[in-house]
């Protein structure tokens, strides 16, 4: 058949463009491999559209134009629905499928009629569409490349660069420690509970009292720094500082207000002063997979990750769910018959990997004492951080209102309830883990349980900060911040004499992370500490 002799490729460019555009927007949070299945799915859809249109029209130009139109409608539906969800028009919210489906149906009928009956010069439109599709794909590719070269891409964080390239400079202080004389070296656990806020902020923002949890920690020997705040309001900044025992401006010359490059932070986390100094005196370093490449210390002596499945057999990822929600498949997931919706919710639940990883890490963390020799353990646990998928007893919460809502977070009611549940869940689990560690350690360990930042607004910098030192430590105090954590450990355990730095907390912009604004403590009780 002559109509099969030429196939226009631009509908396929239009099909993969939504995947690339969505990845370009979210590349700082996800690795590149997550686009593979959406990429394949988009090509399959466009191929089916094209084959059907070609069979009906017997004209490759007309079939391509119809396919391009159908592709744009299919892949734009969820985006328009999302836009309406966070917008009001004349004081009304029109984010309803009963409103959007008829509008799209009218566009569908008019578009098919116009393409089939009104267009005469299909070759002209083909050239126009080729130009548009190439421009769209190229713009997303360029955005991804720029993100990669600036180090804001999650995949770029795995590319090693030298300290000189990154503008890093030697620490102005020389950190050298010695093994404690006459006694065994204790294991050191640095446990980060991501986004775990301070007790007073929990009460104020979430009406949650974690005092029973804190009292249980105190019963186990922990010191609770009741007025602690993080030094920075974002994970990468906070960990780069605490793991190098200093503020960022002392560690590099490129931490300037107009620099968006976060790759120096990744290097500082992966090649931290803390890891180096403990390795130098015979410690074995242990780290865990987190799902966030910037905090995955794959260069540790032992890197713990759950067994992985083949790519095409893995459960759906958050990026893939976000992509599916941006298409017309959202209609079936939200307005289809209840059995269909339940099946789709089960299949497309995007956080199986997250849940399995967190549970696996907690299990393996409790088993660390079985590993012989002194150990420095870095465990960045993504909890109580979003997504809110656990009930207090550890069951899955597959309710999309808690993790799949317009904007960055669920609606207020579900955000408050969801965060409270995650706090209750991680409190129960981490207490059980700590008790196992203590029961099975031959030498009493050092354990730090610390939030990397808080949750929201003025309380964003308030964090949980708990220390277990065998015999206690006179150097701990209520307002101690993460930058001084390992200075105290080195002084108390390893006989160092490092001065403690002033505890300063800074807020900054996510895109320009080094535009710092110093934030004073607002708690009257803590101001006096």
Image (cartoon, rainbow, N blue to C red):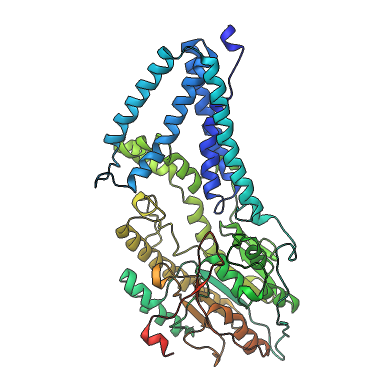
- Foreground: 83 or 174? 83
Residue 3 location, x and y as percent? Answer: 56, 10
- Foreground: 137 or 321? 137
As drawn, which residue projects farthest toward the left? 91
Query: Compared to 113, does 524 lie above or below?
Result: below
Residue 160 location, x and y as percent? Answer: 72, 58
Q: Quadrant of residue 248?
A: bottom right
- Foreground: 141 or 411? 141
Q: Going by the image, does 118 lie left or right of 369? A: left
Q: Going by the image, does 311 lie left or right of 179? A: left
Q: Going by the image, does 8 lie left or right of 340? A: right
Residue 322: in sight, yes or no? yes
Query: Compared to 253, does 138 lie above or below?
Result: above
Which residue sits at x=57%, y=25%?
Answer: 130
Which residue sits at x=61%, y=14%?
Answer: 6
Which residue sits at x=53%, y=30%?
Answer: 14
- Foreground: 339 or 105? 105
Q: Going by the image, does 27 lie left or right of 408? A: right
Q: Quadrant of residue 438?
A: bottom right
Q: Quadrant of the C terminus?
A: bottom left
Query: Compared to 483, does 404 lie above or below?
Result: above
Residue 28 location, x and y as percent? Answer: 56, 54
């Amino acid at each position: 058949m002559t109509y099969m002799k030429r196939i226009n490729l631009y509908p396929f460019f239009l099909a993969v463009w939504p995947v690339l555009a969505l990845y370009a927007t979210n590349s700082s949070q996800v690795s590149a491999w997550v686009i593979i299945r959406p990429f394949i799915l988009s090509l399959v859809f466009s191929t089916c559209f094209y084959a059907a249109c070609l069979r009906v029209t017997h004209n490759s130009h007309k079939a391509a134009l119809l396919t391009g139109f159908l592709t744009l409608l299919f892949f734009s539906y969820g985006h328009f629905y999302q836009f309406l969800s966070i917008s009001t028009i004349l004081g009304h919210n029109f984010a309803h499928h009963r409103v959007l489906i008829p509008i799209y149906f009218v566009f569908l009928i008019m578009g098919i009629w116009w393409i089939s009956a009104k267009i005469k010069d299909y070759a002209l439109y083909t050239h126009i569409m080729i130009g548009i599709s190439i421009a769209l794909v190229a713009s997303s590719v360029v955005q991804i490349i720029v993100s990669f070269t600036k180090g804001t891409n999650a995949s770029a964080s795995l590319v090693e660069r030298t300290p000189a390239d990154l503008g890093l400079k030697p620490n102005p202080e020389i950190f050298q420690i010695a093994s404690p004389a006459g006694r065994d070296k204790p294991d050191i656990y640095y446990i980060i509970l991501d986004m775990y806020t301070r007790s007073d902020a929990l009460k104020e923002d979430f009406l949650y009292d974690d005092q029973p949890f804190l009292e249980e920690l105190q019963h186990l020997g922990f010191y609770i720094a009741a007025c602690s705040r993080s030094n920075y309001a974002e994970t990468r900044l906070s960990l780069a500082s605490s793991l190098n025992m200093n503020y960022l401006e002392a560690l590099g010359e490129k931490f300037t207000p107009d620099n968006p490059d976060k790759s120096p932070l990744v290097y500082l986390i992966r090649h931290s002063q803390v890891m180096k100094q403990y390795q130098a005196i015979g410690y074995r370093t242990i780290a865990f997979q987190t799902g966030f490449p910037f905090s995955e210390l794959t260069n540790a002596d032992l890197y713990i990750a759950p067994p992985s499945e083949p790519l095409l057999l893995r459960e759906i990822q958050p990026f893939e769910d976000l992509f599916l929600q941006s298409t017309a498949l959202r209609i079936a997931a939200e307005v289809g018959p209840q059995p269909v919706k339940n099946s789709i919710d089960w299949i497309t639940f995007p956080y199986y990997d997250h849940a399995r990883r967190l549970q696996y890490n907690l299990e393996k963390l409790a088993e660390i004492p079985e590993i012989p020799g002194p150990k420095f353990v870095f465990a960045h646990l993504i909890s109580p951080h979003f997504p809110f998928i656990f009930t207090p007893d550890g069951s899955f919460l597959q309710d999309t209102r808690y993790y799949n809502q317009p904007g960055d977070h669920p609606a207020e009611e579900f955000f408050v309830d969801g965060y409270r549940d995650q706090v209750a869940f991680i409190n129960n689990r981490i207490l059980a883990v700590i008790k196992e560690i203590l029961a099975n350690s031959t030498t009493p360990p050092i354990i730090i349980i610390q939030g990397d930042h808080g949750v929201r607004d003025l309380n964003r910098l308030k964090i949980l900060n708990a220390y277990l030192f065998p015999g206690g430590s006179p150097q701990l105090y209520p307002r101690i911040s993460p930058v001084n954590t390992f200075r105290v450990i080195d002084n108390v355990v390893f006989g160092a004499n490092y001065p403690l730095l002033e505890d300063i907390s800074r807020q900054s912009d996510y895109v320009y992370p080094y535009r710092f604004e110093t934030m004073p403590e607002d708690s009257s009780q803590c101001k006096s500490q």
